[in-house]
Amino acid sequence: MTIVDLTRDLVAIPSHEDETAAGDHIEDWLRRETDAEVRRDEVGNVIARTGRGEETLALVGHHDVVAPGDSQVTDNGGESTDPAYVVEERDDRLYGRGAADMKGAVAAAMIAFEAADPAGELVFASFVGEEVGGVGARHAIERGFAPDYAIVGEGSTGYSAPGVTDVAVAHKGRRGSTITASGESAHASEAEAGENAIYRATDAVDLVRELEPPSIEVAGETLAGSVVVTEIEGGSGWNVVPDRCAITVDERTVPGERAPIDRVEAIPGVEWTVDQDLPPMRCEDEAFAETVRDAADAAQSGTPELVTKPHATDAGWLAQAGTQPVVCGPSEPGEAHTDDESVSIDVLERCTEIYRRAAEGWLR
């Protein structure tokens, strides 16, 4: 089966609300096409193992997607009660929800997993729930999924130069949090009788604006964090001193330090709650990163570089658990989550070769 055929099959299967059918297809293919030990865990992750050795390399992806646009779904003219995703091939690209993020990379990893003569133990893993906080990766890690190394097939094409598939050795994380200010309501004509929660919240905003987010130097680039107030909600009427105000904060984190947002709790009546914390990633093993870069160099005419990514991926959860991960995949900046999402067929073939070469060479 070609990379185009397998990617087409995977992209056509809806998996934004329920990943079961996509997981079934991946599991069935691996059982049919490989001699690997294949299992499906309680949440729907598909994990396969082949080869032997004391050290393990995992090819990692996810088969869930974000909700499709109307143009990306078809009921085959009313002939089917089970809608499918539209998949189109034109201009040497495959179009469809999940083509770039990241069923194309999953297909490339599957074919490489089947074709490789691995240097050690080789693992294929396709997780569920990446788009909703890394549910599948976290579940697997909590139950012992612990490869020594990993190549996560999220997008790394076009970061150093157009069309070049690079190797990302670090990426930002995301911490989403809420600052809640409490006060005491009163009639606005007697404002001094109350305690204005919005005023307390704006004091917190002023503090957040003064924070200096940390940054690190990786692969000759500056990976800089950020802290941004993105939403504010409070008050119940034009003539009422508000007793509550909530602020949403989007923070992009880097490996190491975090911005000290907790300082807002020194303000009377202010609490800070972390709602989501997607960890950043940094590969500390330079030799492994160079091995994958060498595989990428051999698989294309362009010259790949070690780069950084702004987006959180499942590589963050793996790094947090002790794995040395890199990110290398076909998706280009601006392709994921769009109504005209697409992936280059040439780059899919390239990534298949990168994964195969890396699987065969990372210990040699």
Image (cartoon, grey):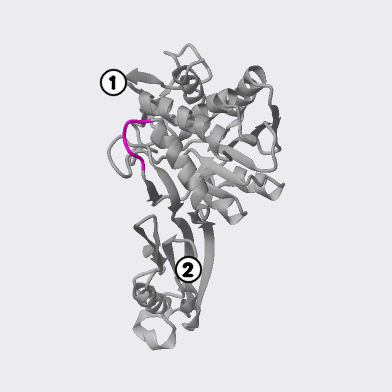
Q: Quadrant of residue 204?
A: bottom left
Q: Residue at x 39, y 48 (%)?
A: 306
Q: Residue at x 43, y 41 (%)?
A: 293
Towards the viewer: 51 or 238: 51
- Left or right of residue 254: residue 40: right
Crowdedness of circle 1 by 10 Å Cα count: few (<14), some, many (20+)?
A: few
Crowdedness of circle 2 by 10 Å Cα count: few (<14), some, many (20+)?
A: some
Q: Quadrant of residue 339?
A: top left
Q: Which mark is residue 258?
A: 2
Query: Residue 257 location in percent, x, y?
Result: 48, 69
Towards the viewer: 114 or 188: 114
Does residue 280 show up magenta in the picture?
A: no
In the rendered view, would you say 32 is above or below 347?
above
Does residue 301 show up magenta in the picture?
A: yes
Query: Residue 25 location in percent, x, y?
Result: 59, 23
Towards the viewer: 344 or 358: 358
Q: Which residues are magenta?
A: 300-304
Q: Residue at x 63, y 25 (%)?
A: 24
Instruction: In the displayed orientation, state which residue is furthest to the bottom.
Output: 192
- Left or right of residue 93: residue 102: right
Towards the viewer: 327 or 15: 327
Residue pointed to by mark 1: 91
Residue type at tag 1: Asp
In the rendered view, would you say 48 is above or below 208?
above
